[in-house]
Amino acid sequence: TGDTSLTFRSLLHIEPDSVLIFRKTSSTVQAQSQSQVLKLKNVHSGCIAFKVKTTAPKSYLVRPASGALGPGETDKVQIIMQPALSECDSNHRFLVQVVPVSDARPVSREDWQKFPRGSVKEQRLRVDVEEVQVGAGSPSLPSPAPPSGDLKVKYDEL
């Protein structure tokens, strides 16, 4: 299966295909992890194996990090930025590797290393971090609490 005429795009369609955008708030209150979904679709006539790597493995959780797909099959890879280590920056990169295989069984780490160099196709994705300002105009925040007079009335009703 060392066909060098195959390209990454003739084997696997990924979405997004070049940039993963993570939104990072400046507030420490919202320290929840940010995640992105990488959609994969086998566009090859045979089975393929895929692997997702990152230049910052401690900053992201990638699930599943590898797998196999039959013809026409799809999968979703969740990429979660770790909140405690959210030194997420635009220098981080992801690499998606794909190779044609004989069946849709998962490929071991050892077997990945045995593939001929030309048969593994790669697509790089960069990370883009958007700073989100948390303030009164932010639509993601819950509406402000009612005036304290209303709370007093509700409290008295109890």
Image (cartoon, rainbow, N blue to C red):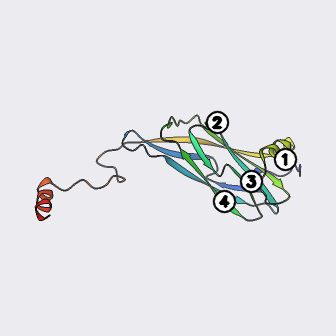
**Horizontal side, residue 99 vs residue 18: left or right:** right
- Horizontal and vertical percent position of residue 121: 78, 47
Q: CA distance from mark 3 to mark 4?
A: 16 Å
Disc 1 residue type? Ser
Q: Which residue in the protein does label 3 denote?
A: 9
Disc 4 residue type? Asp
Q: Find numbered disc 3 in the image and state the secondary structure of the residue it sits on.
A: helix
Earlier in the chain: of badge 2 and badge 4, it is: 2
Look at the numbered discs 2 and 4 and tell me whether their residues touch, using CB distance below 8 Å.
no
Q: Residue at x 83, y 46 (%)?
A: 111
Q: Which residue in the protein does label 2 denote?
A: 55
**Horizontal side, residue 42 vs residue 82: left or right:** right
Q: Which residue in the protein does label 4 denote?
A: 75
Q: Using the image, tell me which numbered label, if any, was put on residue 119.
A: 1
**Callout 4 crowding tier (Cα within 10 Å): few <14, some 14–19, many ≥20:** some
Q: Residue at x 33, y 52 (%)?
A: 141
**Horizontal side, residue 152 vs residue 115: left or right:** left
Residue 7 visible in the shown view: yes
Disc 3 residue type? Arg
Q: How many marks?
A: 4
Disc 2 residue type? Thr
Which of discs 1 and 4 lies nearer the camera? The answer is: 4
Q: CA distance from mark 1 to mark 3?
A: 13 Å
Quadrant containing the C terminus in the rendered view? bottom left
Q: Find numbered disc 2 in the image and state the secondary structure of the residue it sits on.
A: loop
Q: Is residue 73 above or below residue 132?
A: below
Earlier in the chain: of badge 1 and badge 3, it is: 3
Q: CA distance from mark 2 to mark 4?
A: 22 Å
Look at the numbered discs 3 and 4 and tell me whether their residues touch, using CB distance below 8 Å.
no
Earlier in the chain: of badge 2 and badge 3, it is: 3
**Callout 3 crowding tier (Cα within 10 Å): few <14, some 14–19, many ≥20:** some
Look at the numbered discs 1 and 4 and tell me whether their residues touch, using CB distance below 8 Å.
no
